[in-house]
Amino acid sequence: MSEKEANTVFIGRKPTMSYVMAVITNFNSGDTKEVVLKARGRAITTAVNVAQVITRRFMKDLKVSKIGIGTEEVTPREGGDPRKVSTMEIVLTKP
């Protein structure tokens, strides 16, 4: 696994605090300077919550250095027409 992938937290259906702990663990292991939160669809709200909880309560020295939004085309498992899903990337950096 490359360093970029190791410092990426994919947001899904778990509770917010699970992802908060994953980010804190990433920053505390080694000399990590940046962690990327990636989310799609309904998980985007969880990603924003994770970023806010970390920067306001746990690691106040972290900054949100970049936010990227986009759209991915996803094909349903059962087949059918592909649909577009919103995506978001939030980059958290330590000074």
Image (tube, rainbow, N blue to C red):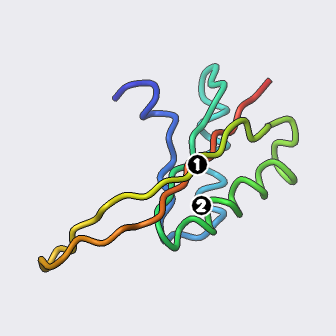
State whether residue 85 is above or below residue 62. below
Distance CA(mark 2)–CA(mark 1): 6 Å
Residues at marks 2 and 1 touching, judged by CB atoms closer than 8 Å = yes
Amino acid type shown at disc 2: Ser
x 45%, y 24%: residue: 3
For label 2, the SS is helix
Q: Which residue is mark 2?
A: 18
Few, some or many residues within 10 Å of mark 1 (<14, 14–19, 20+): some
x 43%, y 58%: residue: 71
Q: List the single residue furthest toward the left.
A: 79
Pick the front one: 80 or 12: 80
State whether residue 67 is above or below residue 1. below
x 68%, y 60%: residue: 48
Count of residue discs: 2
Q: Quadrant of residue 29?
A: top right
Quadrant into which the C terminus falls: top right
